[in-house]
Amino acid sequence: MDWRAEIEAAVDRISPHIRRTPVEQAPDIGPNVWLKCENLQVTGSFKVRGGTNALLKMGAEQRSRGVVTASSGNHGLGLARAANQLGIPATVYVPNHADDSKVRTIQNLGVNVDRVGDDCVETEAYARIMATGKGQSYVSPYNDAAIIAGQGTIGHELFQQIADLDAVFVSIGGGGLISGIGAYLKAVRPDIEIIGCSPAASPAMHACMNAGKIFDVVCRDTLSDATAGGVEPGAITFDLCTQVIDRSLLVGEADIAAAIRDVVGTHHMLIEGAAGVAIAGYRQVAKDYVNKNTAIVLCGANIGLPTLRKVLQGGSR
């Protein structure tokens, strides 16, 4: 697939529906560091890019039947917002542990929400079955070329916003975000380094890449709930991640919490755990990037109030 062409087409397709988010210099984090503020995106997360692109690529008849997805929150919210704008019936299945505030926000956009399963992979499998039974389209949170291309529009913006970009730090869940960003940037400038960052408590893609295959990785609770859970068997993001990621890092919960506190305190912006993962990853290897123009993707701002309260009080759970 010509990912550069797919992503550039996605830019034209979704631009009227999303924000071109700013980059902000962050000397407190490191020299020559810019924060890509997807936490300021509509719905508070980058996920609306992929969801909007996927729905806009569908034909009228396909849209009229409705869509189904599975999500721990942000993808469901992004797809719900796109479905609401385009008048498409939608159902979102979320894991039993999904954040209540995210679920309420999805419901407020007029889509059906059901809780199913204790793990994202289990929820995704159930959602696929329901979509097939209803004759509706299933829209994966990450295992979908249109989703990946939509997320890749961030790479397109970064290339225009930061001159002589050398490296990008991105959190990894199912791999849709880093696959899209990496696919675009490697196409326009192969020497740009793509660094994937995962919570040590839920390192599914990191472990699968190290093993050279997708397998069931044991995952624990993490502040980075947006990246939590396993990788779906056969996910196209696995091969893409293997191709575009130059370095993969694991970070601890205390470092994720510290990153959230620091961005709130210094930049006066709200970020969620998954965004903190990318900052924590940079800090872990900051000495290697002192002389490099570096972007850190703040992928979202949707953190639950109870979790935020604990983090600001010095906790990591």
Image (spheres, rainbow, N blue to C red):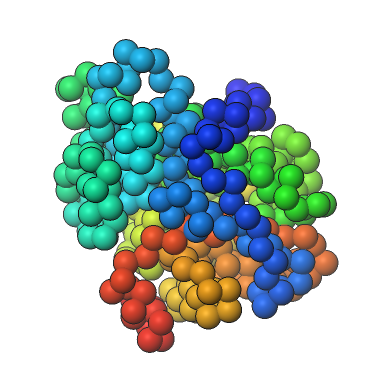
* 258 versus 219 height, above or below: below
Residue at x 53%, y 80% (from the top left corner): 265
Q: How many numbered marks does the figure carry?
A: 0
* 267 versus 7 height, above or below: below
* 100 versus 89 height, above or below: below
Residue at x 26%, y 25% (from the top left corner): 66
Residue 64 in sight here? yes
Asked whether, in this view, residue 253 is left or right of residue 152, the answer is left
Give the camera-side residue of 185 and 253: 185
Residue at x 41%, y 86% (from the top left corner): 314
Asked whether, in this view, residue 49 is left or right of residue 243, the answer is left
The image quadrant that residue 98 belongs to is: bottom left
The image quadrant that residue 195 belongs to is: bottom right
Asked whether, in this view, residue 257 is left or right of residue 96, the answer is right
Quadrant into which the N terminus falls:
top right
* 247 versus 113 height, above or below: below
Residue 196 in sight here? no
Quadrant into which the C terminus falls:
bottom left
Asked whether, in this view, residue 138 is left or right of residue 294, the answer is left
Residue at x 59%, y 51% (from the top left corner): 21
As drawn, the residue found furthest toward the bottom would be 313
Query: x, y percentage for residue 26?
Result: 68, 70
Query: x, y percentage for residue 226?
Result: 39, 56
Give the camera-side residue of 250 and 39: 39
Query: x, y percentage for residue 180?
Result: 57, 39
Give the camera-side residue of 133 and 119: 133
Query: x, y percentage for residue 199?
Result: 46, 64
Give the camera-side residue of 264 and 290: 264
